[in-house]
Image (spheres, helix red, strand yellow):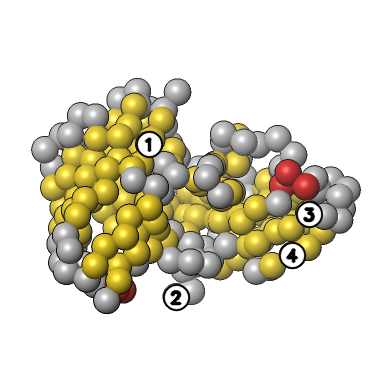
């Protein structure tokens, strides 16, 4: 059974204080690992897809990395508008496009 | 281009009542999904469709039915609602490996 575990459950940062969110996974043949951002009362918003160990992707203050067992979402010099829940999900090999297993999410709060 | 839309946004049902949630997408995507999101449980896949006229079970399908009669629409039905189905329901459609989510429907079953 595919499993995704995110840590920490919640993270409070001061503006400008860099940190990382963790996503550990077990999956039968990783087809892709996904990061989403979810604001309160809204649907998840796609951030990144990573396909193989060693791959990295960046978007503004966010950088996602992937190893064979986990992924990190690094947040550099965060701003209050980065406050959201960040979700990690995996797609197993041999499954249909978009058939994802999600973690429980990390609630990030950035204080000014 | 509205993306993925969901109707209704909120609904309160009594135990045993039935209802249908509507999802529509205007991006010509083949793949569509229904998830539920509960506190501490993350997003869990209920049913999905890989094309018009097809449906398949996800992780938590019991108590739900779906239909995909038109490519742009994916309907989720609750035949006899139970309090355990109180949740926020999200629809999504997929282009290759990027899922686009709707704004969600908050359902309360009393």
Discs 2, 3: same chain: yes
Helix, strand or loop for disc 2: loop
Tag 3–tag 1 contact (CB < 8 Å): no
Q: Chain of mark 2?
A: B
Residue A28: image location, x then y, percent: 35, 23
Helix, strand or loop for disc 3: strand
Q: Which residue is mark 4?
A: B11
Q: Is residue A81 above or below residue B82?
A: below
Residue B70 falls in image quadrant? bottom right
Horizontal side, residue B30 vs residue B15: left or right: left
Q: Which residue is mark 2?
A: B1
Residue B41: image location, x then y, percent: 53, 42
Residue A36: image location, x then y, percent: 35, 55
Discs 3, 1: same chain: no
Identify the mark at residue A5; answer none if there is no mark: 1
Classed neighbour count for the residue bearing mark 1: other residues with Cα under 10 Å, few (<14), some (14–19), many (≥20): some
Q: Which residue is mark 3?
A: B109
Residues at marks 1 and 4, CA–CA distance in whole angstroms: 31 Å
Q: Nearer the viewer, residue A32 or B51?
A: A32
- Numbered label tally: 4
Tell me, yes or no, if residue A56 can be seen here.
Answer: yes
Q: Nearer the viewer, mark 2 or mark 1?
A: 1
Discs 2, 1: same chain: no
Q: Nearer the viewer, residue A57 or A62?
A: A62
């Amino acid at each position: 059974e595919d499993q995704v575990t995110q840590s920490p459950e919640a993270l409070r940062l001061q503006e400008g204080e860099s940190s990382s969110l963790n996503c550990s996974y077990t999956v039968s043949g990783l087809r892709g690992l996904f990061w989403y951002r979810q604001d309160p009362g809204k649907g998840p918003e796609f951030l990144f897809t990573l396909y193989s160990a060693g791959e990295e992707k960046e978007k503004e203050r966010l950088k996602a990395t992937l190893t064979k067992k986990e992924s990190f979402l690094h947040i550099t010099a965060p701003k209050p508008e980065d406050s959201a829940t960040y979700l990690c999900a995996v797609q197993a090999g041999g499954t249909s496009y978009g058939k994802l297993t999600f973690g429980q999410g990390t609630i990030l709060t950035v204080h000014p | 281009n509205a993306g993925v839309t969901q109707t209704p946004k909120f609904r309160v049902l009594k135990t045993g009542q039935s209802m249908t949630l509507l999802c529509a997408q205007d991006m010509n995507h083949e793949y569509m999904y229904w998830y539920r999101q509960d506190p501490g449980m993350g997003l869990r896949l209920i049913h999905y469709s890989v094309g018009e006229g097809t449906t398949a079970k996800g992780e938590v399908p019991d108590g739900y039915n779906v239909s995909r009669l038109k490519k742009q629409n994916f309907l989720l039905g609750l035949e006899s609602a139970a309090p355990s189905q109180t949740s926020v329901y999200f629809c999504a459609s997929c282009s290759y490996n990027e899922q686009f989510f709707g704004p969600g429907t908050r359902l309360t079953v009393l």
